[in-house]
Image (cartoon, grey):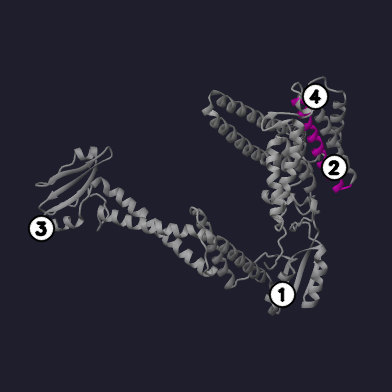
Amino acid sequence: MIVKMKKLTLLCLAAMKQNTVDRLADLGVVQVTADKLNDSGDRPALAAELTRLERVIGEIRSFDKPEEKSSFSASPEVLFSELEAKLIKYDALEKELDLLNRQRETFLPWGEFSPETVAKLKKNSIFVTLCSLSSEEFKKFSAPEGAVVHIVSADKALTRFAVITTTVPPENLPKAQLPENTSLTEVNNRMKEIKQEADELYKQISRAHGALPILLDYQAELQNKYDFLACRDSMAQYGEIAVLTGFVPVPEVDKLTLAAKENGWGIQLEDPAENENPPVLLDMPKWLNPIRPLLEFLGILPGYREVDVSAPMLLFMTIFFSMIVNDAGYCALFLIPSIYCIWRFRNSAKGRQVAALFTLFSFVGLIWGILAGSWFGVAWGGIDFLTNEANKNNNIQFICFTLAVIQLSLGHLIQLFKELKFRNIIVQLGWILVLSGFYIVAVKVVAYPGAMPEAVKYLIGTGVAILLIFNVKWNDVGAIFNFPFEIINCFTDTLSYIRLFAVGMAGGYMASCFNMMGCSIMAGAAWAIPFGVLVIFLAHVLNIALSMISVLVHGVRLNTLEFSSHTSLTWAGSEFKPLKKK
């Protein structure tokens, strides 16, 4: 259930802004909204420090994690400062090394020479000018009178040569662009020094993986401080009065009202306007809590004025998981650690919810796998409806289409009860009639081919007629042209559920084929048995990974796209995040 919100306008003395923010944080029931933040010195400085800290944490994570854990006793502030300095130094060394490497690449074709020697020769009236030309241009090159030309190196692109004269060389010589006041030896020596220094810094920064928990706690502390300052700076000021706006859940109104009396605040509570989008707070019974981690992982929430579909989503995701994994052996492997994790994370609400979700998925998947008679790709047991080779595929396809009509019709029933008006009721019943007709068409065309029942044309015809009369806006040309596509989409949404059969069957065939491949290897010779076992093991690991990806791709899609479109869900909600002390 989506908890109703009240829009809050709070008035306090301007001199008590900080105290008001602290008290609201103690309550932890108000999400503050801010259209504009007032300028202040401490908040931008804290924001800059947060940005620097986030960059330091991100860079540390990019370094290889050492095998041995390191402990740190320094304060978070000192630790952050030291690591930031090391990272800045490491970046500077990397940039210098890159520059030196480019210089080295420039020097290499010229070989080793000493700029000091060239300078000494110049003092003795022997001028050495290093030049470069393309091979074609070099053929046309005419050396100055009395000069000696010595080719240093040549390739397809350039010819590098030295022009040696006893008089000052002409200015028009094609001089090579080489780094000044250094040599290849000096560059190589400096690169060696930098690499040693950078390697040592790399080790020190890598060990800082052990400091990440400290830095993350420090980041949360700074973020909490920033939230407080942003809340303070969001308060508009009118003379001696400061004004704060936000949202508060209706069940928490009494707590806020009591705090207002104790602190001398003036508060106004009103229903959010239609053009406002309040944050979303889901109030679920305990048995529904396992769906929370999935919603958080996907980053989706229903809009404030939409319907909470957590219960049907949990139900159908569990069924989809079972049909996609389609193996009792795999689900038995999942079930054991997931039950252990419920106990292991008994003191962590989120950890326990994740473990409970996977336990539910695994348990129902195990039941489906037993009924389907599939154990690590080996057929054993099961019920005739799901194992009879003659018609098991047709039966599973029938189940897929039945799930489609149930879930999509449920979406329209949700819309029906959301707005109990005659026109809306008739429209949603019309869509259910169309869905029922398409369900029969899908079953008779794909699952059980045969003559089409007479009821189909009455169901689809009646449904389309109802929609034409009550749903299509005849004064809107776009709606008129879009209506046929809506009907087609309704049919394709029904057919889309066949993916449950296709993905589950593909996983089963993969497991079976790899089993046969491994057995063939083991049958060749005794020494090949370990290789056959390894092939089977790796194949099942790959199949499990692909099954998990398929659950996320196909199972989530059916809930967040097909089902959501028939429920008019946009998932446009933003999470309710009250100001609170952490």
The answer to whether residue 195 shows anywhere in this view is yes
Earlier-in-chain disc, 1 versus 4: 1
The answer to whether residue 484 shows anywhere in this view is no
Question: Residue beneath label 3, please?
Answer: 124
Question: Residue sitting at 85 percent across and 26 percent down?
Answer: 457
Residue depth check, mark 2 versus mark 4: number of the one nearer the observer: 4
Write the start and end of the magenta stretch as one range.
392-420
Q: Label 3 is placed on what type of residue?
A: Asn
Q: Label 4 is placed on what type of residue?
A: Lys
Question: Residue sitting at 72 percent across and 71 percent down?
Answer: 26
Where does the C terminus fall, quadrant-wise?
bottom right
Q: Label 2 is placed on what type of residue?
A: Leu
Q: Position of residue 491 (x, y in %)?
A: 76, 32
Question: Along the horizontal axis of the image, is 137 left or right of 281?
Answer: left
Tell me, yes or no, whether the highlighted magenta stretch contains residue 363.
no
Q: Label 1 is placed on what type of residue?
A: Thr
Earlier-in-chain disc, 2 versus 4: 2
> In the rendered view, would you say 472 is above or below 12?
above
> In the rendered view, would you say 247 is above or below 404?
below
Q: Position of residue 511 (x, y in %)?
A: 64, 31
Report if the CB atoms under discs 2 and 1 are less than 8 Å apart. Answer: no
Earlier-in-chain disc, 2 versus 3: 3
Badge 1, how many Cα within 10 Å: few under 14, some, many 20+?
many
Question: Residue sitting at 86 percent across and 23 percent down?
Answer: 453
Question: Residue beneath label 2, please?
Answer: 413
Tell me, yes or no, whether the highlighted magenta stretch contains residue 402.
yes
Residue 20 is tagged as 1
Residue 444 is tagged as 4
Residue depth check, mark 4 versus mark 3: number of the one nearer the observer: 4
